[in-house]
Amino acid sequence: RKEVEQDPGPFNVPEGATVAFNCTYSNSASQSFFWYRQDCRKEPKLLMSVYSSGNEDGRFTAQLNRASQYISLLIRDSKLSDSATYLCVVTAEGDYKLSFGAGTTVTVRA
Amino acid sequence: ETGVTQSPTHLIKTRGQQVTLRCSSQSGHNTVSWYQQALGQGPQFIFQYYREEENGRGNFPPRFSGLQFPNYSSELNVNALELDDSALYLCASSSDRLGEKLFFGSGTQLSVL
């Protein structure tokens, strides 16, 4: 079983729509959670950290469910510029490596 | 711009050859990690260097090796290249060895023919 699994998509949505997707992780000792954004074959960039209480950053909302071991990302009022691959990332306490999912591709159309 | 630079940006090699990829970390960062990203996959951890010592290693064979220099720049060496080594190689720096917020370079796209 992979450490981090994501629905690959693609999610094709019109501008202004809301899109949401999940990621599951297998290691119950995972302590830190992130969403990274990656544009086509460019470097991943940190989008946001995910906190236990859930958190928002503008149009982006992240949620963590430790009991079911999943993380979600919701994008409201989608923009064309939101088109990218979203990588779910987890790490265990004291661990030096990040475990990445394979990514969820989102395409926002005009 | 993260301040992490990698060279070269693209490279073509043939099977069996050796390759060296280079990375300059962001100013003030003493930790460098290397990741391999195959097409359609997420980045996979290769190893991490902290203050010139290998600090941890992922599930990669010994033909993947690295170095970190006193200025915290780093090299990734791959010997006896295989076709499956074709991937985007990403270097990331952080301010400490447990740094969770990594700053990635733009990567080296390696093609093995």
Image: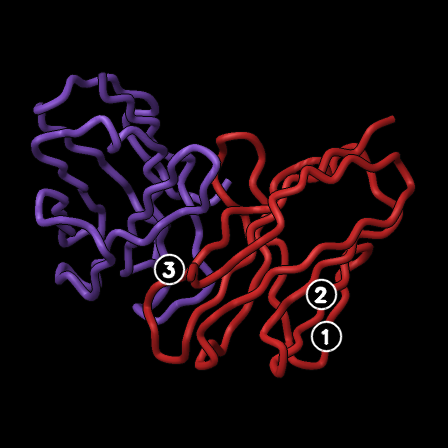
Residue A67's mark? none
Q: In terms of secondary structure, where does tag 2 sit?
A: strand
Q: CA distance from mark 3 to mark 2?
A: 23 Å
Q: In the picture shown, does residue B70 fall above or below A61?
A: above
Of circles 3 and 2, which is in front? 2
Tell me residue A74's x, y (percent): 77, 57
| Three-letter code for the amino acid on which mark 2 is drawn | Ala
- Residue wearing tag 2: A62
Asked if residue A48 lies left or right of residue B34, the reply is right
Q: Residue at x 58, y 74 (%)?
A: A69
Q: CA distance from mark 1 to mark 3?
A: 25 Å
Q: Residue at x 23, y 21 (%)?
A: B112
N-terminal-most mark, 1 or 2: 1
Q: Which image quarter: residue B100?
A: bottom left
| Three-letter code for the amino acid on which mark 3 is drawn | Ser
Q: Are marks 1 and 2 in contact (CB under 8 Å)?
A: yes
Asked if residue A37 lies left or right of residue A53, the reply is left
Tell me residue B53's x, y (percent): 13, 62
**Pointer 1 and pointer 3 on the same chain:** no
| Three-letter code for the amino acid on which mark 1 is drawn | Gly
According to the colouring, which chain is purple?
B
Q: Residues within 10 Å of mark 3 (few under 14, many from 20)?
A: many
Q: CA distance from mark 1 to mark 2?
A: 6 Å
Chain containing the residue with disc 3: B
Tell me residue B59's x, y (percent): 23, 56
Q: Residue at x 15, y 32 (%)?
A: B20
Q: Colour of chain A?
A: red
- Residue wearing tag 3: B94
**Pointer 3 and pointer 2 on the same chain:** no
